[in-house]
Image (cartoon, helix red, strand yellow):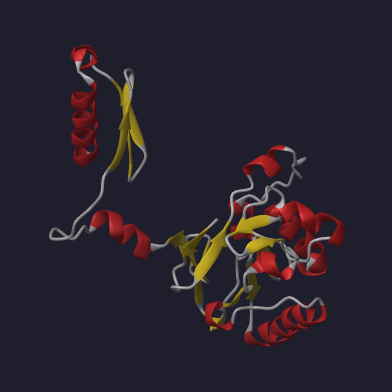
Amino acid sequence: MLFVKKKDDTLRLCIVYRQLNKLTIMNKYSLPQIDDLFDQFRGATVFLKINLRPGYYQLKVKEVDTLKTVFRTRYGHYEFLIMLFGLTNTPTTFIDLRIPVFHSYLDQFIVVFIDDILVYSRTKNDHDAHLQIALQILCEKQFYAKLSKCEFWLRKVIFLGHMVSFEGIRANSKKALVLVQLESKKEYVVYSDTSYTGLGKVVVYASRQLRPHERNYLTHDLELAVIVFALKI
């Protein structure tokens, strides 16, 4: 058990349920194709983005199953009464619950993707009605949004790593700048790996086979070779 700091400096409790997950029958759910979701935004001029409060924590675990979530601390043993991160079926359970809730309005003016809800409208008057419907559903079904992560009356919105607006859809330029405008005085960490057949690294993903003479390198020479390879990309 450990705590991981989130972007807003709050902490997320993480527990490894590896053994429990091995015994769990996985629920299958296919996430929608991102391109299909983006097609729905054609002609939309106003957007509303809703992010639910720690989404999984809004779902209760069946009383007969809470014993399976037991974890140990120096203060004793505890079990979860609500759904938590780390269980193999938590994401699919969360999605399976929310899709029926908004089913009547999907592909019309609402998109649901994991814990994000996007409402899109062609006109301001339409948006007034759509906003009321979306919030009414959340209220009736007792889903709670995190106000600090909700964005209202937007002409453009960041959704699934893309900038969406009436003008079209493009990649989020703020993230692209991190790759193309590196700060020369800032320290960077290169994540790389090597084997006796090839080199690999992360920034943009890349790899290549070893050249004939490189196959004679010792392990520490291969580790240096992959760093050089990464820096040259």
Residue at the limit of the structure toward the right, as seen here: 64
Q: Is residue 54 left or right of residue 186?
A: right
Residue at the limit of the structure toward the left, as seen here: 185
- Above or below: residue 32 compared with residue 212: below
Residue located 59% across and 54% down the image: 15
- Image quadrant holding the C terminus, namely top left
Residue located 65% across and 56% down the image: 71
- Above or below: residue 144 compared with residue 23: below
Q: Is residue 22 left or right of residue 233?
A: right
Given residues 182 and 87, the one toward you in this image is 87
Given residues 132 and 29, the one toward you in this image is 29
Image quadrant assignment for residue 214: top left
Given residues 172 and 83, the one toward you in this image is 83
Residue located 20% across and 12% down the image: 216
- Image quadrant holding the N terminus, namely bottom right
Q: Is residue 57 left or right of residue 217?
A: right
Image quadrant assignment for residue 102: bottom right
Q: Residue 170 at x, y = what percent?
A: 45, 60
Given residues 47 and 228, the one toward you in this image is 228
Q: Is residue 25 left or right of residue 216?
A: right
Residue located 29% across and 59% down the image: 178
Q: Residue 143 at x, y = what percent?
A: 73, 75
Q: Residue 121 at x, y = what percent?
A: 65, 76
Count all numbered tags in the image, as a single digit. 0
